[in-house]
Amino acid sequence: MDLSYDVLIVDDVAENLKVAMNILRENNYNFSFATNGNEALDIVKKKKFDLILLDIMMPELSGFDVIEALKNDTDLKDIPVIFLTAKADIDSLAKGFELGGVDYITKPFHPLELLSRVSTHLELYKSRKILQQNNLNLNIKIKESENRLLSELESSQKEVIFLLTELMESTSDETGKHIKRVAKYSKLLAELHESLTHEDANLLYDASPLHDIGKITIPHDILHKPGRLTEEEFEVMKSHTTTAHNILKNSSRELIKTADIIAHQHHEKWNGNGYPQGLKGDEIHIFGRIVALADVLDALTHKRVYKDSWTFEKATQYIIEHKGTQFDPYLVELFEANLDEFEKIVNL
């Protein structure tokens, strides 16, 4: 028999304690005993037990009082309790089971009955603990597997985004380094923003390269026109925001959902004069507001087929002048306070 089993016997009659221990000694259990309820509760707080044999009729605290206290204690509530009773009346037994007792044994003890019931409940308790541990280990393995799969999925999503940006680079001389710089500006703004977390900044960095993914559907002669677009051509160009939204909107993945927000809203303006929805102020998602500023900063400071590059100082002046109209005022303040950091990215 497993010597690790610890049994607490609680009875206010010393003779009953001796009889029970003499019978159970045959199986080499480790015994502790208490002669009243208060003593029993003190003992169980100091030592772990695998089973409690609990007399019902005791002075001060009855067996019913003791088991109620045990069941109200998170650390003790799972210990199996077998009631010891001199009179097996239906009401007492019903109350004992209702309070959480697992069995009862009548006094005087019959040796085989006592041995058998104690052994049975100790084995059940041991099996339950093993099952709980196995379930815990299984849950841990499941969680680890889920985390691994999510990590692999996230890596796959980032790889797809990389491949898409490579495709965009191959169709336009302007978008390659532009995409990388916009991601860096966006991450920097997110890191400076007091309401955004490190995780938000990384998410924005990973998703922002898709801000112009809708342009892959724009006709080449419009996308690369060296002169000013006509009103009709500009309407076609503006459609890249809604095209991207229609492509990305059905994903349930956080990275793609974020990319959808950015692609759809990065041409909205703080004063509501942007497109495609004409959103205003805080109606524009913070990620959309951040990429809007980042996209314009990079477009101004680098050559395009339709314009020469501006100096960083001139681009800075433009952004500051459009604070509160085109751009989120708080983001412009962050930009102004950290010009050196943004200029380093411009020169990459």
Image: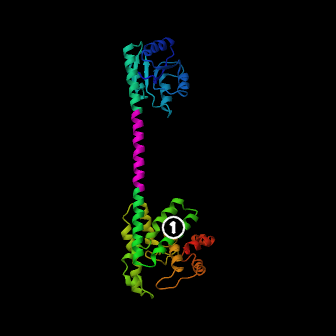
Q: Quadrant of residue 250?
A: bottom left
Q: Quadrant of residue 189?
A: bottom right
Asked whether, in this view, residue 330 is left or right of residue 53, the answer is right
Is residue 42 visible in the rendered structure shown here?
A: yes
**Identity of the amino acid at label 1?**
Ile
User: Main structural element of the magenta stretch: helix, strand or loop?
Assistant: helix
Specify few, some or many for label 1: CA neighbours under 10 Å numbering under 14, 14-19, or 20 or more. Answer: many
Is residue 55 visible in the rendered structure shown here?
A: no
Q: Quadrant of residue 83?
A: top left
Q: Magenta span has 156?
A: no
Label tally = 1
Q: Magenta span has 133?
A: yes
Residue 139 in the image, given as x and y percentages of width and height: 41, 43
Q: Height in image: 227 above or below 76?
A: below
Residue drawn at (39%, 35%) of the image:
131
Residue 23 in the image, given as x and y percentages of width and height: 43, 13
Q: Height in image: 204 above or below 129?
A: below
Query: Is label 1 in a helix, a strand or a loop?
Result: helix
Residue 29 in the image, given as x and y percentages of width and height: 45, 20
Question: Which residue position is annotated with label 1?
Answer: 286
Compare residues 186 and 238 and report the one nearer the observer: 186
* Range of magenta residues: 130-151
Q: Can you say which quadrant of the picture contains the C terminus?
A: bottom right
Q: Can you say which quadrant of the picture contains the N terminus?
A: top left
Compare residues 77 and 170 and report the one nearer the observer: 170
Q: Height in image: 96 above or below 320?
A: above
Image coloring type:
rainbow
